[in-house]
Image (cartoon, grey):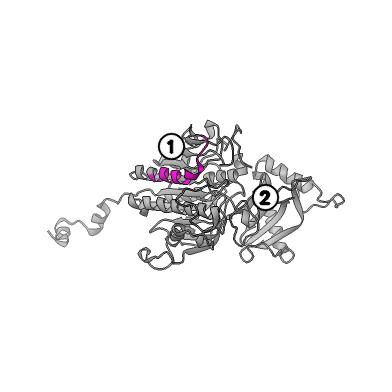
Amino acid sequence: MRRRSFIKKTGVSALTLATRAPAAPVVPPNFVVILADDLGYGDLGCYGSRIATPNLDRMATEGVQFNQFYAASPVCSPSRAALLTGRYGVRCGVHTVFFPNDTNGLALNEVTIAQMLRPAGYRTKCVGKWHLGRPAPYLPTARGFDEYYGIPYSNDMEPSVLMRDTEVIESPVNLSTLTRRYTDEAVHFIRRSRSSPFFLYLPHTFPHIPLAVSPDFAGKSGMGLYGDVIQELDWSVGQVLQALRENGVDENTLVFFTSDNGPWFQGSPGRLRGRKGDTFEGGMREPFIARLPGRIPVSGAVRQSISPTRQARRVDAMASTLDLLPTIAGFAGVPVPRNPLDGVDIGPLLRGEVKDVDRPPFLYFSGWNLQCARLGPWKLHMTRNNVPAYTAEPKVGNYNLRLLNLELYDVDADPEEADDVSAQNPAMVADIQQRVLQMLPSFPAEVRAAWNRTQSTPVYPNEPGAYPTPIVP
């Protein structure tokens, strides 16, 4: 019977038919977060490096690339805490790096991305460097991950151990095969999890020193051992993306790539001032690439026509690792944790629906010390370490010093932070200061005490007693 005749004889309307038709099942997206360690803003081909990174470059052309994306700390552990919780490390009891003998870790009342997703039926695995606590209650398997494989802290720390779940399976660790083994674990997890939603967190050990590379990549970059390591990381990204395609989940997997902080002794911050440990841009601005075919639009024509030389869609709006948890929650359709978040959902930015998103000032911490604040294009420097990080110079007196003359930079126009425009913009200086003072009472006592100590300590012995900003309770 023809459809029109059926409707006429039965009196069933087309609208009723449409209403009664079963809805297509909503398939929750998968998530893969790939995190490099100590990668510089200028270390990838798509960010201007001479090191060849074809897989990451192609990932950028198939998704979106951010120009102003920030780690939430210039050092490892606080940055990782912020990524996994959407909250500044100082809120999570993580203000500096953890060491193997430390008895604590990421505060147990914090909720990680994995803990957020598991109640929705997600399988979860962490492969790589953890660095959020070595005791069993702080390891990944106690923080929402079904499985763990990796080094629990930095590769320059002793004892050198590789773990599976909570057991040490190798000591010392053969670093030259580590990237390859991490990649094999990640690919195997994707294969085993293709029939259910999954979250794969892949925090690589490199390019943190000491550097090591497999024989297949030794000497291949023409840019020294550091370049070889970057190329093997790029290969690893390619293997993960290939595994997604081969297992039929490519079209429903949101993949992020970024780094925990800027480059240490090697690597390039590009045009940016500063390196790891600094709250200058070079210590915290990172590469960031996101890819979800069909839901994150690319630049221009359809995806099938993209070539490796095509330009990526670039986003100029500021975002940070704090934003990953709320963004993943938005894509997954799950509630965010009850702890107040510092990050915001950047899904509309990824999907190209908006040019920017509203957010409170972004804060730059060094340890417990609040040093800078970013509002729109404006970055205000208020305090600073008295010597550069990671140097042999002795630290004399107060380690964190307030600036006698606050420095304001338009980092949209001046990413090098070379031209202090505070004198020309006193209203903006005052506005950011006021916003910071309003935010400080919500932070732990250690942050407030560090702020007060810095504000009340003379920079010079004979300095007058007028201080630039008030003490907070």
Disc 2 vs disc 1: Cβ atoms closer than 8 Å? no
Q: Specify few, some or many for label 1: CA neighbours under 10 Å numbering under 14, 14-19, or 20 or more.
A: some
Based on the picture, tell me whether residue 178 belongs to the magenta stretch. yes
Which kind of residue does numbered mark 2 sit on? Gln
Magenta segment? 171-187
Q: Secondary structure at mark 1?
A: loop
Q: Position of residue 361 (x, y in %)?
A: 62, 54
Residue 246 x, y percent position in the rendering: 33, 51
Q: Is residue 45 magenta?
A: no
Image disc number at residue 146? 1
- Mark 2 vs mark 1, CA separation in Å: 40 Å
The residue located at (52%, 42%) in the rendering is 129
**Taken as a whole, is the magenta stretch helix, strand or loop?**
helix
Q: Which residue is mark 2?
A: 438
Residue at the far right in the pictured view: 462
- Whether residue 255 is visible, yes or no, is yes
Q: Is residue 80 left or right of residue 378?
A: left
Note whether 145 is above or below 401 in the view shown: above
User: SS for tag 2?
Assistant: helix
Q: Name the image quarter holding the C terminus.
A: top right
Q: Amino acid at mark 1?
A: Asp
Residue 9, picture quadrant? bottom left
325 and 210: which is toward the camera:
210
Q: Is residue 354 left or right of residue 381?
A: left
